[in-house]
Image (spheres, grey):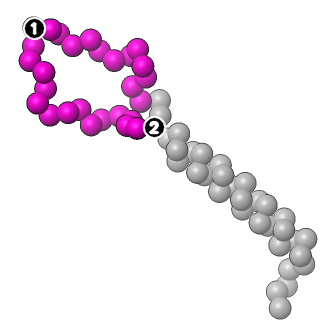
Amino acid sequence: MSGLTPDQIVTMTEILVVLMGIGITWLVYRGSENAELPGDARIPDPSQADDTVPDTRGRTL
């Protein structure tokens, strides 16, 4: 048997779930300040040709 009471197991589970939620949230939003937001994109120069390779930096859907 375990040396923990059912209340201690429930408390430890609650703490671990909260910490996992915080960790997952941090992972999702880490580096998001570098994302290109709508309206922040540079307007390309019409006299230059389009890039042949798509820009894959930043966030995608």
Tell whether 50 sits left or right of 20: left
Residue 43 at x, y = what percent? 26, 11
Q: Residue at x 66, y 52 (%)?
A: 21
- Above or below, 49 relative to 24: above
How crowded pointer 1 is (Cα within 10 Å; few <14, some 14-19, many 20+) is rated as few
> Is 50 or 42 nearer to us in this picture?
50
Q: Which residues are magenta?
A: 34-61
Q: Main secondary structure of the magenta part?
A: loop
- Above or below, 49 relative to 25: above
Label annotation for residue 31: 2
Residue 54 at x, y = what percent? 20, 33
How crowded pointer 2 is (Cα within 10 Å; few <14, some 14-19, many 20+) is rated as few
- Above or below, 52 relative to 9: above
Among the two numbered marks 2 and 1 on one chain, the one whose residue lies closer to the N terminus: 2
> Is 50 or 10 nearer to us in this picture?
50
Q: Residue at x 34, y 18 (%)?
A: 41
Q: CA distance from mark 2 to mark 1?
A: 33 Å
Could you tell me the amino acid type at mark 1? Answer: Ser
Residue 48 at x, y = what percent? 9, 13
Split into 4 quadrants, where in the image is the C terminus?
A: top left
Label 1, on which residue?
47
